[in-house]
Amino acid sequence: MTEIVIFLEDIDPVVFFGANNTLLDKIRSFFPKIKILVRGNEMKCIGEESEITIFAEKFNELIEYYRKYNRLDEQDLEKYLFDKEHMRSATNGDFEEVLVFGTSGKPIRARTVNQLLLVHDYKINDLIITDGPAGTGKTYTSIALAVRALKEREVKKIVLTRPAVEAGERLGFLPGDVKEKLDPYLQPLYDALHDMLPFKKLETWLEDGTIQIAPLAFMRGRTLENAFVILDEAQNATVSQLKMFLTRMGINSKFIMTGDTTQIDLPRKNESGLLQAMRILEGIEGISIIKFDERDIVRHKLVKRIVKAYEQEEKESPGGQ
């Protein structure tokens, strides 16, 4: 391991690293293999020599940019740190890889280290479990992978599902058929698909069953072969529901579960099948478990700060970890 110390001479670290260290967190997310410790104007970096060398070069470019323009934001960081050569060495992947072209023609790519890890692990695992806060792109990236797999005929159908916990026993009192009753709970999945597929193509595939969107309860009794299956909001699936879901896996199928174990809506949190699955399936060949965090949040910059504030509150509360 190599250790270097960088001194920020004549630079205010509070300004340079952003309020609440938001820019420092962003820098760390680009270099996940390097341990970065900051105290005042001194920054200590520990990691493999090859990574440290790249980091030092890129960081010095940031310092020069800051001194020249007296400003630094997330777009500037991406300009100097978000390069193909570094990210390939840092994550064994490539941020330049296009997953699918959206309906507007805009290329959809992995945008954070853990999103890229999801893309990488998909290639070598048949079951991927992701856990992390809202806005980290877990579901969106998974659906992009599914659409690409369908277009390239790696699978014959996409199945998207989520537990309708919020509906509870009230579904019978809602107007309309089952689809109309459940669509509000499945809307986030439709929104992602509309970003990636032309309206007519999506409607055709929904009508002929090439793409199926259904509540988790509808999975019982099925065997899903040649399918890309995504379980969203998996933290709200009970232990028995999740076991049922996992045993639906058939030949040539890919399963991805996405969830947020800090947002469990079940009556008792210990009933969450996702918590159990992450514990007992860790280390099994063919299964990947990826932990997303606030550094992966790609929504409004305030979302990242909000998530961090809530996490801090939970740690400081009497029942926190």
Image (cartoon, helix red, strand yellow):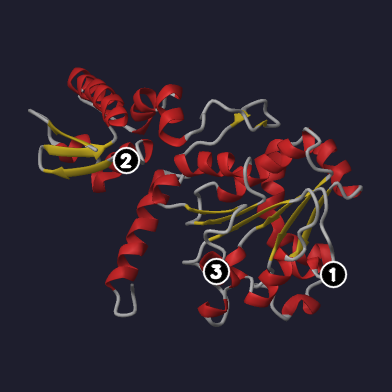
Residue at the limit of the structure toward the right, as seen here: 208
- Residue at the image position 88 percent from the left and 50 percent from the top: 209
Camera sees residue 294: yes
Q: Nearer the viewer, mark 1 or mark 3?
A: 3
Q: Please, what is the three-letter code of the amino acid marked with disc 3? A: Ile
Q: Is residue 253 left or right of residue 234?
A: right
Which of the numbered marks, if any, corresponds to residue 280? 3
First in sequence: mark 2 or mark 3?
A: 2
**Spot occupied by residue 171 in the image (x, y as percentages of width and height):** 76, 75
Name the one closer to the observer, 263 or 130: 130
Q: Identify residue for label 1.
A: 221
- Residue at the image position 76 percent from the left and 59 percent from the top: 249
Quadrant hosting residue 194: top right
State the SS at label 1.
loop
Q: Identify residue for label 2.
A: 28
**Spot occupied by residue 257 in the image (x, y as percentages of width and height):** 62, 57
